[in-house]
Image (cartoon, helix red, strand yellow):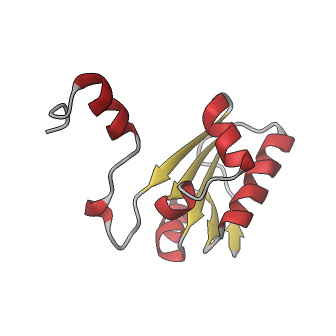
Amino acid sequence: MEAATGSATGGARLVVIGSAGLADGFSLIGAEIHSDADSAAVENILAQLVKSGDEALVLLESHLAHAGGHWLDRLRNEGGRIVVTELPPLSAPYDYAPAVDDVVRAVLGPEALK
């Protein structure tokens, strides 16, 4: 796993966790990248963010975002200074459907996103 640091957002950290092909592109805008991380590494990174007190936007590749874990679940449920969101896989961007789509369909009906 490779990590590069930078701050493209001023006081907040932009953290990208995913495959090297996807994450490395974000290094061009100064993101802190963690290439080829597994779900244990995601939990470690999130725990460090919580303990540091930093504000952060964390972008997780889809397979990592669905892996679950104590810190991932906690941050998603509480919101606040660390925002976690999902990125589609580089190899299949058109097959990606964000989790919010299901919520929108449940509230507005099955035809809402067509």
Q: Quadrant of the N terminus?
A: bottom right
Percent coordinates x, y for residue 55 in the rendering: 70, 36
Q: Is residue 107 visible?
A: yes
| Residue that lies at the very extreme toward the right in this rendered image | 51
Q: Quadrant of the C terminus?
A: top left
Foreground residue among 105 and 85 = 105
Q: Seen in the image, is 112 located left or right of residue 72?
A: left
Kindly identify the residue that appears in the image at 55 percent across and 66 percent down: 18
Foreground residue among 24 and 94 = 94
Percent coordinates x, y for residue 43 in the rendering: 74, 56
Foreground residue among 2 and 36 = 36
| Residue that lies at the very extreme toward the top in this rendered image | 107
Disc count in the image?
Answer: 0
Locate residue 56: give its quadrant. top right
Locate residue 83: give its quadrant. top right
Percent coordinates x, y for residue 50 in the rendering: 79, 41
Foreground residue among 89 and 69 = 69
Kindly identify the residue that appears in the image at 80 percent across and 49 percent down: 47
Kindly identify the residue that appears in the image at 66 percent across and 47 percent down: 72
Percent coordinates x, y for residue 51 in the rendering: 86, 42
With respect to residue 33, does 107 lie above or below?
above
Q: Is residue 12 visible?
A: no
Q: Seen in the image, is 2 located left or right of residue 84?
A: right
With respect to residue 79, does 46 lie above or below?
below
Kindly identify the residue that appears in the image at 58 percent across and 58 percent down: 16
